[in-house]
Image (cartoon, rainbow, N blue to C red):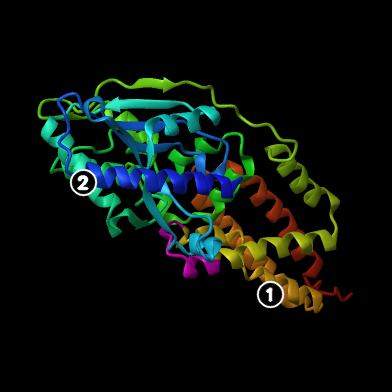
């Protein structure tokens, strides 16, 4: 399926590149339109947040093209490693508008259009700038989850065309990035949990930048330029209700059942396995914090819960060193208390709370088992 999609995209790219090369010197007619396209949410990981693109249409010149800043190549060598490290190159491609709309119709995702109310000169400037980017090395950029993505690139190129910071965020600037992201994972519980614990302090900053498609859509509706609205009211091109997936395993119930089992079974081996899994997750977080260029993964305080030092506790326990097993259990209980206090006002407190409670039970049990009893002399 991916190979077919890649060949289809490649064919469209070659076709449209030849068209763009030809159209670079074409002056747009008075009927030309420049629009921001916002695409609805999907249930694939890459589509959870929607998508943003720019449409240029001009019936007089037979132009109707969509510029898409969110393309990447699955066939890139070491694709997963590059994506994790944060140096995967995204790039701009174009689609005919009809092809673009058909793809979203097949995926049953809504599409909205906001026509920019700018002069013909500015439309021409935007059109030329888009074509210039498309045919140069500027078409490649290093993807950053918050700072550089399909939406922020559209904001930047339009603002550049308008010679100023015209489009800025108009709502939710008092919320953190983490709080803004949290609802987008509805129906995808373990994705919500995973992103909650892998992201560090950057996503706890106030979300003052436009980085999501519907943030741009809502901000455009409230933006003025030269004393008039920058964009017309949003037009719905495709309308679908987002289907929230149901899964027998990807939900809060399996999460609570697993943690409840760990608490209630009261078994040394189960406790060790639980702590071992937490420690491995912590090791992964530490490695990613140093390895990855994604600033969202740096300074991850969630390692207080997922502590790599739990590996040392387990080794002392296996070696039957009660004194140091007890000391490390108490140390991690202190970590857990500080972590819970620090997390109280964070968006992911409730989703992590069952794990905090489970870890508390397990660590208390480990401490009790390994606390040296002082003999009573009568």
The answer to whether the residues at label 1 and label 2 have Cβ atoms under 8 Å apart is no
Residue 244: x and y in percent read 61, 29
Residue found at the far right of this picture: 378
Residue span colored magenta: 286-296
Can residue 58 be found in the magenta stretch?
no
Is 295 included in the stretch rendered in magenta?
yes
Quadrant of the drawing holding the C terminus: bottom right
Which badge, 1 or 2, is on the more N-terminal residue?
2
Instruction: Judge left or right: residue 216 versus residue 228.
Output: right
Q: Secondary structure at mark 1?
A: helix
Residue 149 shown left or right of residue 364 in the figure:
left
Q: Which residue is mark 2?
A: 129
Q: Residue at x 57, y 40 (%)?
A: 44
Residue that label 1 marks: 312
Q: Residue at x 57, y 61 (%)?
A: 304
Q: Nearer the viewer, residue 199 or 109?
A: 109
Q: Nearer the viewer, residue 331 or 64?
A: 64
Neighbor class of circle 2 (other Cα within 10 Å; few <14, some 14-19, many 20+) is some
């Amino acid at each position: 399926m991916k190979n077919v999609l890649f060949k289809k995209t490649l064919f469209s790219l070659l076709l449209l590149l030849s068209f763009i090369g030809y159209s670079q010197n074409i002056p747009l007619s008075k009927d030309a339109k420049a629009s921001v396209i916002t695409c609805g949410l999907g249930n694939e990981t890459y589509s959870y947040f929607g998508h943003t693109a720019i449409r240029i249409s001009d019936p007089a010149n037979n132009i109707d093209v969509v510029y898409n800043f969110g393309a990447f190549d699955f066939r890139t060598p070491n694709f997963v490693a590059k994506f994790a490290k944060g140096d995967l190159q995204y790039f701009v491609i174009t689609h005919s508008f009809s092809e673009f709309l058909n793809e979203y119709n097949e995926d049953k995702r809504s599409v909205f259009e906001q026509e920019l109310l700018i002069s013909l000169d500015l439309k021409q400037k935007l059109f030329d700038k888009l074509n210039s980017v498309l045919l140069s090395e500027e078409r490649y950029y290093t993807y950053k989850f918050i700072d550089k993505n399909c939406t922020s690139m559209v904001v930047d190129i339009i603002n550049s065309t308008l010679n100023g910071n015209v489009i800025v965020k108009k709502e939710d600037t008092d919320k953190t990035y983490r709080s803004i992201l949290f609802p987008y994972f509805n129906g995808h519980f373990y994705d919500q949990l995973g992103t909650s614990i892998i992201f560090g302090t950057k996503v706890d900053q106030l979300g003052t930048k436009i980085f999501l498609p519907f943030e741009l859509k809502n901000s455009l509706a409230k933006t003025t330029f030269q004393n008039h609205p920058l964009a017309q009211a949003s037009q719905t091109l495709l309308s679908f209700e987002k289907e929230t997936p149901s899964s027998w395993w990807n939900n809060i119930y399996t999460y609570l059942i697993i943690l409840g089992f760990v608490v209630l079974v009261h078994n040394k081996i189960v406790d060790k396995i639980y702590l071992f899994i937490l420690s491995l997750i912590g090791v992964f977080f530490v490695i990613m914090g140093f390895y990855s260029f994604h600033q969202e993964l740096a300074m991850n305080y969630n390692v207080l819960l997922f502590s790599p030092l739990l590996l040392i506790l387990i080794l002392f326990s296996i070696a039957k060193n009660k004194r140091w097993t007890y000391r490390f259990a108490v140390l991690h209980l202190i970590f857990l208390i500080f972590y819970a206090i620090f997390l109280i006002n964070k968006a992911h407190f409730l989703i992590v709370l069952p794990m905090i409670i489970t870890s508390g039970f397990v660590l208390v049990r480990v401490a009790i088992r390994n606390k040296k009893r002082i003999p009573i002399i009568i």
